[in-house]
Image (cartoon, rainbow, N blue to C red):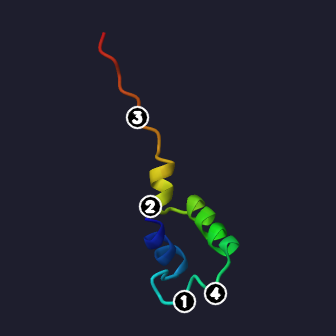
């Protein structure tokens, strides 16, 4: 999910040769944290919307 989100949100293709070797862990960490505040796959998995309350029958 993170790989797909990085490509969709930031245009970063982590599969491209050398793309991550020229970047620091800080750079990658900042983008992954940024995905948490975007409408991304990883954000939806880790922070799902609350489920609607079900009415109980009496």
What is the x, y in percent for residue 57?
A: 29, 15
Query: Are dots 2 and 3 in contact, CB under 8 Å?
Result: no
Q: Does dot 2 land on a helix, a strand or a loop?
A: helix
Q: Earlier in the sequence, mark 4 or mark 3?
A: 4
Q: Residue at x 55, y 77 (%)?
A: 10
Between the C-alphas of marks 3 and 1, the distance is 45 Å
Which residue is disc 2 drawn over? 41
The N terminus - image quarter? bottom left
Q: Gap in Å between the C-alphas at discs 4 and 3?
A: 45 Å
Question: x and y percent of residue 56 in the render?
Answer: 34, 18
Furthest toward the bottom, the residue is: 17
Q: What residue is shown with label 4? A: 22
* On screen, residue 54 above or below 42: above
Q: Which mark is residue 52?
A: 3
Mark 3 or 1, which is nearer the eye?
A: 1
| Pointer 1 local density, CA inside 10 Å: few below 14, some 14–19, many at least 20 | few
Residue 18: which disc? 1
- Element type where label 4 sits in the image: loop
Precedes in sequence: disc 3 or disc 1: 1
Q: Residues within 10 Å of mark 3 (few under 14, many from 20)?
A: few
Q: Earlier in the sequence, mark 2 or mark 1?
A: 1
Residue occupying the far top of the picture: 58
């Amino acid at each position: 999910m993170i790989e797909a989100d990085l490509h969709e949100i930031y245009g970063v293709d982590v599969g491209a040769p050398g793309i991550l070797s020229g970047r620091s862990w800080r750079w990658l960490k900042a983008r992954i944290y940024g995905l948490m505040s975007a409408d991304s796959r990883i954000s939806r998995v880790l922070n799902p919307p609350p489920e609607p309350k079900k009415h109980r029958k009496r």
